[in-house]
Image: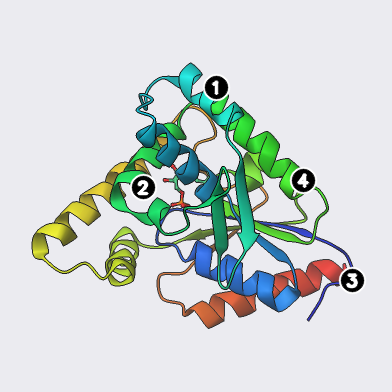
């Protein structure tokens, strides 16, 4: 099914809500481009770690971001992420970068730059962009806004499965990290993780991916007609 117009679809939600998988599947079904905004914060965080830029120095991080090229290329179920031309798609998923991305993304000057770039990337429409502030800050006028949520325990379990974590210690650390990042995303001053007023909230706790994708498709079809 391909909509008659090039809609903008914003999908927000916390880690483990199913965002990435669902955004990728929806984009594929509609023939849209899927953009993972989190990958941009992750790529910047990786560069900050490599160049030893302090993660609490907003101005230095902003300057770093200004001199950094981050490209998101469609690739299977997600994006290939290029940092200054280098493929960092795998590296940015590792625990140290994950933790650093959460810290880098609290700074308003960094967010302003990222949001401007994200708007540019999605300016043509026909895009599914996923993140934390897409419906509230990046595309407040998006035709479709979905906020995915799920019970915290279920989200943590999904993350464990996804990461193939083995030892109990590793599992505990991963759960603690998830809770820390969640709290930071929800309580930061700049664009905290909250549903946009006009977002449709879907609780994915007890739903399969196929069910949620079908629900989003229905919403898109209704919007396309209406
Ligand atoms: O979605 P993902 O887990 O890849 O995002 C990495 C981090 O980037 C998140 O923990 C969050 O702090 C931040 N982020 C954000 N705004 C977005 C996307 C991600 O602040 N739109």
Instruction: Compare residues 198 and 61 and report the one nearer the observer.
Output: 61
Of tags 2 and 3, the one toward the viewer is: 2
Sooner in the amino-acid sequence: mark 3 or mark 1 = 3
Residue at image mark 2: 98
**Residue 60 x %, y %:** 47, 19
**Residue 17 x %, y %:** 44, 62
Sooner in the amino-acid sequence: mark 4 or mark 1 = 1
Residue at image mark 4: 141
| Local crowd size for mark 3, using a 10 Å CA cut-off: few (<14), some (14–19), many (≥20) | few
**SS state under label 2:** helix
Q: Is residue 55 above or below residue 3?
A: above
Of tags 3 and 1, the one toward the viewer is: 1
Residue 4: image tag: 3
Q: Quadrant of the N terminus?
A: bottom right
Residue 157 placement, left or right of 147: left
Of tags 4 and 1, the one toward the viewer is: 1
Q: CA distance from mark 4 to mark 1?
A: 29 Å
Residue at image mark 1: 63
Q: Is residue 111 above or below residue 136?
A: above
Q: CA distance from mark 2 to mark 1?
A: 21 Å
Sooner in the amino-acid sequence: mark 2 or mark 3 = 3
Q: Is residue 186 visible?
A: no
Seen at 67% across and 43% down, the residue is: 118
Q: CA distance from mark 2 to mark 4?
A: 29 Å
Q: How is the image coloured?
A: rainbow
């Amino acid at each position: 099914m391909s909509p008659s117009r090039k809609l903008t679809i914003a999908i927000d939600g916390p880690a483990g809500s199913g965002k990435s998988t669902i955004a990728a599947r929806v984009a594929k079904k509609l023939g849209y481009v899927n953009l993972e905004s989190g990958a941009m914060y992750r790529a910047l965080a990786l560069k900050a770690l490599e160049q030893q830029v302090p993660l609490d120095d907003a101005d230095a991080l902003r300057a770093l971001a200004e001199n950094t090229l981050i490209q998101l290329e469609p690739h299977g179920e997600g994006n290939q992420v290029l940092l200054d031309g280098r493929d960092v798609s795998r590296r940015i998923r590792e625990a140290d970068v994950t933790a650093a991305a959460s810290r880098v993304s609290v700074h308003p000057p960094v967010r302003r730059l990222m949001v401007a770039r994200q708007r540019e990337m999605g300016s043509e429409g026909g895009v599914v962009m996923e993140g934390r502030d897409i419906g509230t800050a990046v595309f407040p006028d998006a035709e479709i806004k979905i906020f995915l949520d799920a019970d915290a325990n279920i989200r943590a379990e999904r993350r464990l499965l996804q990461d193939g974590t083995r030892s109990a210690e590793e599992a505990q650390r991963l759960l603690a990290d998830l809770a820390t990042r969640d709290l930071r995303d929800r309580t930061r001053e700049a664009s905290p993780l909250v549903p946009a007023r006009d977002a449709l909230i879907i609780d994915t706790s007890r739903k399969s991916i196929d069910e949620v994708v079908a629900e989003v498709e229905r919403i898109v079809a209704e919007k396309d007609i209406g």
